[in-house]
Image: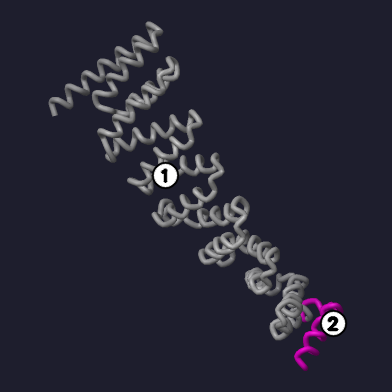
Amino acid sequence: ADVESDAARRASLWARQARVQSERMDDAETAFGTLLCAFQLRFADVYGAELARLAERCGRRADLMEAYGRGVAILGDVEAGLALRRRMGDWCAKADDLSGAQAHYQAVLNVVPRDEVSFAAMESILSRKADWTGLVNLLEEAISQNVYADEYRPLLVRIAQIRQTRCRDNEGAVAAWKRVLEADPRHPEALEALGALFLFTEDWAGLAEVLERRRTAIPEEERDGARTVRLAELYLDRLAAPMRAIPLLEEAVAAEAKVPWLRTLARAQSETGD
């Protein structure tokens, strides 16, 4: 305890001396060296912001990163060591060393999977690198580790969006949007996206299921008769399922007795012998 207290006092004295050298003597180089000595006595991140400022002024970023690396090696995975890791990640990201930043933040997440600061930083880095597979893996890990507790649904939506628009992975996007629907059966964006995907891939059964979900999500008195008929025609023309089409057409006729719909109903009934 006495040794620790003595180190803290010495570090504090050096920190004050560095402040004088920087502010009154305008000697950033000497101030950096003095403050670095204070830091290396205890490897406390309390000096991080000022060290970074001085390192920028005198071009000593590499020396500062080396010192922080020694601190990480000595402190290991305790909170103080992880704080240094985060600081190193920040500096790397600021210098556009995205791979270096990613390595530091990932090291923190390996120890503390729910570290929201490092998770958010990793999201930003992977997006900047356009590493969409890596971003999907990160989001999946966040869900499995329950990083955001009950707020996992937005993560599912992001995964689906990335798979559809960034990875151009239709099969993966369909699976991802279905996971969204498992969490929220009436999720409008998921239903819209799945409808477009099924139409593009000509998965008529899948499209019919989506249209059914969208239809039943609306009170019967508010349903759009034209959409009901389009669903009926899908069953009739693409899925050869007139028995599924007839109740839909009857519903549409009852709502808005339109002649074209009556013709479609008649055609469906003729094909079933009714």
**What percent of the width, then of the height, locates residue 160?**
56, 57
Q: Earlier in the sequence, mark 1 or mark 2?
A: 1
**What percent of the width, then of the height, locates residue 60?**
40, 19
Q: From the image, give the main secondary structure of the stretch colored magenta.
A: helix
Who's the residue at 78% across and 71% down the image? 226
Q: Is residue 223 found left or right of 20 in the rendered image?
A: right
Vertical arrangement, residue 189 with respect to residue 55, above or below: below
Please give the residue where the numbered disc 1 appears in the rendered image.
116
Q: Is residue 238 found left or right of 47 in the rendered image?
A: right
Is residue 228 rendered magenta in the image?
A: no
**What percent of the width, then of the height, locates residue 69?**
33, 30
Q: Secondary structure at mark 2?
A: helix
Q: Tell me which corner region of the image, top left, top right, bottom left or bottom right, holds residue 129.
A: top right
Vertical arrangement, residue 196 with respect to residue 53, above or below: below
Please give the residue where the numbered disc 2 appears in the rendered image.
263
Specify few, some or many for label 2: CA neighbours under 10 Å numbering under 14, 14-19, or 20 or more. Answer: few
Is residue 271 rendered magenta in the image?
A: yes
- Magenta residues span 254-274
Q: Is residue 21 found left or right of 193 in the rendered image?
A: left
Q: Tell me which corner region of the image, top left, top right, bottom left or bottom right, holds residue 248.
A: bottom right
* Residue 70 appearing in the image: yes
Dividing the image into 4 quarters, which one contains the C terminus? bottom right
